[in-house]
């Protein structure tokens, strides 16, 4: 049988080892959760903002795509389901989405032919910002709301 001193030394050493392992685990878990490369929500993770939050489903409506936390001078692709096919629509935007030296961008898309040709429907679409290699950097949503044409005509 062990003496109290031997037992206490073993107990203390085991506690220190357990605290070290738990700390190491939490540290490694935390760095992977908050790293932008892991798709986490770290401080510098790229973010996409689409305004307005709900786009009126009508012709000649302007949607602004902006973001921050991207790699400076990077040319971005904006992918959205268009006519049932995921398409890069960045060429339809003015100016083309290119990140400035601070890591931000802002581009406008005037929806006209897309609505006229019924490539969109009044529903919500997923939007992805991708880099030149196709890696998804940020995600957002493009939500269309149906416009009550009769009520809009009465206002005018």
Image: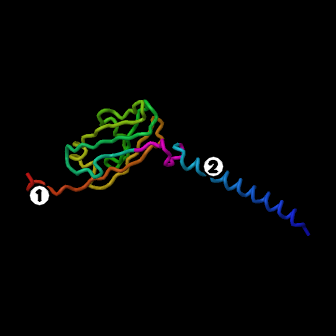
Q: Is residue 113 above or below residue 6?
A: above
Q: Residues within 10 Å of mark 1 (few under 14, many from 20)?
A: few
> Which residue is rendered at x = 44% and y = 42% of the image?
46
Image quarter for residue 4? bottom right
**Residue of label 2:** 28
Location of the N terminus (image quadrant): bottom right
Identify which residue, 36 or 144, lies in the foreground.
Answer: 36
Image quarter for residue 145? bottom left
Find the residue positioned furthest to the right.
1
Which residues make up the magenta segment? 37-47
In the rendering, at what x and y percent does residue 50 appear? 33, 46
Find the residue positioned furthest to the front.
5
Q: Residues within 10 Å of mark 2 (few under 14, many from 20)?
A: few
> Which residue is rendered at x = 83% and y = 63% of the image?
8
**Residue of label 1:** 150
Identify which residue, 86 or 100, lies in the foreground.
Answer: 100
Mark 2 touches mark 1? (CB < 8 Å): no
In the rendering, at what x and y percent does residue 11 appear? 80, 62
Q: Does the magenta-highlighted stretch encompass residue 43?
A: yes
Element at badge 2?
A: helix
In the rendering, at what x and y percent does residue 134 appear? 46, 39
Cα–Cα span, label 2 and label 1: 58 Å
Q: Is residue 51 above or below residue 19?
A: above
Identify which residue, 58 or 101, lies in the foreground.
Answer: 101
Element at badge 1?
A: helix
Identify which residue, 11 or 132, lies in the foreground.
Answer: 11
In the rendering, at what x and y percent does residue 108 appear? 28, 38
Q: Does the magenta-highlighted stretch encompass residue 142?
A: no
Q: Earlier in the sequence, mark 2 or mark 1?
A: 2
Q: Is residue 21 left or right of residue 95?
A: right
């Amino acid at each position: 049988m062990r003496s109290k001193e031997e037992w206490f030394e073993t107990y203390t050493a085991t506690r220190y080892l357990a605290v070290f392992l738990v700390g190491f685990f939490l540290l490694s878990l935390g760095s992977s959760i908050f790293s932008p490369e892991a798709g986490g929500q770290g401080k510098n993770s790229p973010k996409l903002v689409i305004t307005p939050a709900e786009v009126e489903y009508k012709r000649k409506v302007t949607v602004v795509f902006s973001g921050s936390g991207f790699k400076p001078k990077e040319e971005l692709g904006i992918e959205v389901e268009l006519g049932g096919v995921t398409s890069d629509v960045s060429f339809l935007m003015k100016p083309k989405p290119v990140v400035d030296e601070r890591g931000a961008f802002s581009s406008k898309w005037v929806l006209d032919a897309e609505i006229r040709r019924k490539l969109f429907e009044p529903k919500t679409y997923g939007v992805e910002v991708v880099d030149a290699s196709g890696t998804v950097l940020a995600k957002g949503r493009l939500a269309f709301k149906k416009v009550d044409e009769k009520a809009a005509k009465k206002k005018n």
